[in-house]
């Protein structure tokens, strides 16, 4: 599959040439570029994974991240991206949930990095609601502006 991002006329020319050269029956997909997640969203979601780990949920940061990606991210990506959905279903469909979590963690399957701002906002809103209902209150995003960013091993 060839992807061409249109920035200038030369990319448009390349896209036109690719369409002209495509065989009969080829499928052309045109979509707007997604707005990539922000650094602030990225810092906050990783802080939330740490918050959950500190609450003593009994899981490692990596397992919590993989579980959240499976719970919140996979449904969003499968809904919004048919190619991603087909690949995920083919590779992970026969696995049970613990095996899916382990596979996501060990293989470092990109989930949130595939998301735009709106998708990650949806993921994080649902995550925050669910954990609050379970008695785990995640860091308030407003408080994040006072924190010094720290990398977590394995990110």
Image (cartoon, helix red, strand yellow):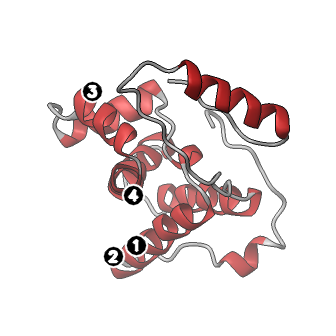
Mark 3 and 2 residues: CB-CB less than 8 Å, in contact?
no
7 left or right of 131?
Answer: right
Please tell me which residue is depicted at 75% across the width and 31% down the height of the picture.
Answer: 13
Q: CA distance from mark 1 to mark 4?
A: 18 Å
- State the residue in front, 43 or 14: 14
Please tell me in which quadrant of the rendered image residue 27 appears. top left
| Residue 136 seen in render | no
**Which residue position holds label 3?**
91
**Which residue position holds label 1?**
131
Q: CA distance from mark 3 to mark 2?
A: 31 Å
Foreground disc of the pair 1, 3: 3
Dot 2: what SS?
A: loop
Q: Residues within 10 Å of mark 3 (few under 14, many from 20)?
A: few
**Which residue position holds label 4?**
76
Quadrant housing the C terminus: top right
- State the residue in front, 102 or 33: 33
Q: Residues within 10 Å of mark 2 (few under 14, many from 20)?
A: few
120 left or right of 38?
Answer: left
Foreground disc of the pair 3, 2: 3
Mark 1 and 3 residues: CB-CB less than 8 Å, in contact?
no
Please tell me which residue is depicted at 33% across the width and 76% down the height of the picture.
Answer: 134
Q: Give the number of the disc on residue 134.
A: 2
Image location of residue 64, percent across then percent down: 43, 49
Q: Say whether disc 1 or disc 4 marks the residue closer to the N-terminus.
A: 4
130 left or right of 147?
Answer: left
Mark 2 and 1 residues: CB-CB less than 8 Å, in contact?
yes
Image location of residue 83, percent across then percent down: 37, 37
Q: Say whether disc 1 or disc 3 marks the residue closer to the N-terminus.
A: 3
Report how many numbered discs are placed on residues in the image: 4
């Amino acid at each position: 599959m060839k992807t061409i991002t249109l920035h200038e006329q030369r990319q448009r020319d390349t896209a036109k040439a690719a369409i002209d050269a495509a065989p009969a029956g080829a499928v052309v997909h045109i979509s707007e570029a997604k707005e990539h997640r922000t650094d602030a969203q990225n810092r906050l979601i990783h802080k939330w994974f740490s918050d959950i780990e500190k609450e003593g949920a009994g899981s490692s940061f990596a397992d919590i991240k993989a579980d959240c990606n499976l719970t919140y991210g996979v449904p969003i990506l499968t809904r919004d991206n048919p190619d991603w959905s087909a690949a995920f279903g083919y590779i992970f469909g026969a696995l049970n949930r613990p095996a899916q979590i382990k596979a996501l963690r060990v293989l470092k399957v990109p989930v949130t990095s595939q998301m735009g701002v709106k998708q990650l906002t949806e993921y994080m809103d649902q995550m925050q609601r669910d954990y609050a209902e379970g008695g785990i209150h995640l860091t308030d995003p407003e408080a994040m502006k006072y924190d010094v960013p720290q990398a977590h091993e394995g990110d």
